[in-house]
Image (spheres, rainbow, N blue to C red):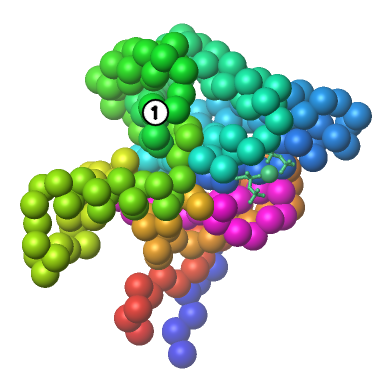
Amino acid sequence: MFFKKKSHEIDLNNLPKHIGFIMDGNGRWAKKRGLPRSAGHRAGAESLKKIITEANNLGVKYATVYAFSTENWKRPKDEVDYLMSLLMDYLVNAEKTLSRENVVIRAIGSRKELSEEMQRQIIKTEEFTKKNTGIVMNIALNYGGRDELVNAVRSICTEGKVPDDITADDIERHLYTAGQPDVDLLIRTSGEQRLSNFMLWQVSYAEMWFTDKLWPDFKPADLHRAILDYQNRGRRFGGI
Ligand code: IPE
Ligand code: IPE
Ligand code: MG
């Protein structure tokens, strides 16, 4: 039997090309400290900056971060408003912070439900960072995996394809992440072990990595641990 030799150092030639982050546990982080949930979201946004910087420095090419799901509108209005204002600040500040680190920022998800101000800022930040050559960071904002697939199917239909001609490539071409590699490594914090409608198509062969740590406590060292575990797994993609 073949056992992969376990390494204790990250192999920079075998990095996951695309890492997905389900950044969960901000609310519980705040609750533990007797703080309002908003404080947890603020701490989570700080955590995100550090993690993207680290992933970029390592040489990871794509990161998708789940910031707001199509289901998160169910939360109380003041929390939704706070999350939206935090995301707005994040996009505005990214021009000074992450863009200087060469990060390309994109938003994925349905935009029409977002405020016009947010929609304009997304376009602005995307334009501002599109010539950068570092990591591509997809911010999943009003994103749902089912919504993405429904939209893809609708677009394929409007192209006038007959059913027998529809291929997996056609679906891929119509995803928000068209042209990007599939997710290799999916990280979820806070102890929950579910997808919560995140990138249903793109995670088909992703390695899943879970930690009990809450997102604001997730540190670059934890990212290293996840990547190391990833590199010590045997990916078979259905083969032997
Ligand atoms: C994740 O943290 C952030 C968003 C969903 C926007 P939560 O707000 O879900 O935190 P918990 O799960 O309630 O602790
Ligand atoms: C998933 O977290 C969405 C984001 C991290 C943005 P949730 O906290 O919304 O997921 P559930 O409700 O626990 O499945
Ligand atoms: Mg949660």
State the image coordinates of residue 164 (x, y, percent, origin top left). Answer: 11, 69
Residue 67, placed above or below residue 238 = above
At numbered mark 1, what does the secondary structure look like: helix, strand or loop?
loop
Query: What segment is highlighted magenta in the picture?
Result: 181-196
Furthest-bottom residue in view? 1
Compared to 96, does 20 lie above or below?
A: below
210 sits left or right of 135 in the view: right
Which quarter holds ligand 3? top right
Name the residue located 40 percent from the left edge and 65 percent from the top edge: 205
The answer to if 143 sits in the magenta stretch is: no
Q: In which quarter of the image is residue 210?
A: bottom right
Image side of residue 74 versus residue 149, left or right: right
Ligand 2 within 8 angstroms of badge 1 C-beta: no
What residue is shown with label 1? 111
In this rendering, would 114 be left or right of 216?
left
On whether residue 192 falls in the magenta region, the answer is yes
